Image (cartoon, helix red, strand yellow):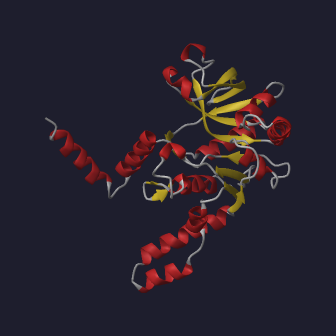
Amino acid sequence: MPSTIRRAVIPAAGLGSRLLPLTKATPKEMLPVGDKPVIEHTVRELVASGITDITIVVSGGKSLIQDHFRPNPALADRLREDGKEAYAEAVEEVADLARRGHITYLDQHGPYGNGTPVLNAARNARDEPMLVLWPDDVFVADVPRAQQLIRAYELTSCPVLALMPMDPADSRRYGVPVVKEDLDDGLLRISGLVEKPVPAEAPSGYAAIGGYVITPGIVDELREQTRRWYEHRTGEIYLTDAINAYAASRAVYGQVISGRWYDTGNPADYLVAQMAFALAHPEYGPALRKLAQDLDGARP
């Protein structure tokens, strides 16, 4: 059946400063996780979940993203001439993925903050809900994270945040939801988020992670934030601020995501994601496990 949500935005205008100097010339969204750049994992998740209109919000220096998804028939033809049919099909499959997701690109304009690219993309969304997924998150799940969020929206017709259980000691790293009601199957009614609380003050045992269903009411809150910013020009435009403002008087839900989350936005977590995908690869995994065993056995 067609998805009740057909639009999605991927904010990809960030500098990737936590990964410098690796991201000095290469956009963080194009760093490989397994045998694909990280943003391709996000696009594949969206297409697999029925999304047919993907907007990637970019800034200067991000042309490699467009080059990756752009058709390249000359390259495919050359590969076939060289007898490399599988490589040619792989090149064409990425372009077909972009076609099925109907990827378009927008340059980011407006105040700094992660709410601005969402507002940029919302200009084309009219009154439709849309998904927002960050391009440095990768989920491995039997049911794609995006599909789990869409299902929660279908049940509630309200904004939805992706959540995961967290170690209380990690609360300083996340926005932590205030849970009002547990509706079973991981669906929670929430009344807002507390940003990076100390463990003793964390309002729940869940963390908000990279994934949202945004409704027109949230977009209105982002517009109001931006209007105030242009009056005073202080601070940044944050999506969580808009969600909190909306949740003060209207319903917002969180969906606890079933699956494994990999954050690639900092060096340690990026290496963990790389290792996990490499170990799971049918060709590379056995060789890497043997290497790890050999290195472990060589320790004094």
Q: Residue at x 58, y 69 (%)?
A: 95
> Is residue 218 found left or right of 167 in the rendered image?
right
Q: Residue at x 59, y 66 (%)?
A: 69
Task: Using the rendered view, name the quadrant where residue 239 is placed.
Answer: top right
Question: Which quadrant, please, contains the N terminus?
Answer: bottom right
Tell me if residue 264 can be seen.
no
Q: Residue at x 56, y 54 (%)?
A: 39
In the rendered image, the residue lying farthest to the top is 200
In percent of width and height, residue 104 lies at 70, 62
Residue 204, above or below 61: above
> Is residue 124 found left or right of 102 in the rendered image?
right
**Number of on-image labels:** 0
Residue 140, above or below 104: above
Question: Which quadrant, please, contains the C terminus?
Answer: top left
Residue 67, above or below 198: below
In percent of width and height, residue 96 lies at 60, 69
* 212 or 5, nearer to the observer: 212
Task: Using the rendered view, name the quadrant where residue 254 is placed.
Answer: top right
In percent of width and height, residue 177 lies at 66, 25
In the rendered image, the residue lying farthest to the bottom is 81
Residue 75, above or below 66: below
* 2 or 128, nearer to the observer: 128
Task: Using the rendered view, name the quadrant where residue 102 is placed.
Answer: bottom right
In percent of width and height, residue 9 lies at 69, 51
Q: Residue at x 69, y 41 (%)?
A: 113
* 193 or 224, nearer to the observer: 224
Tell me if residue 65 can be seen.
yes
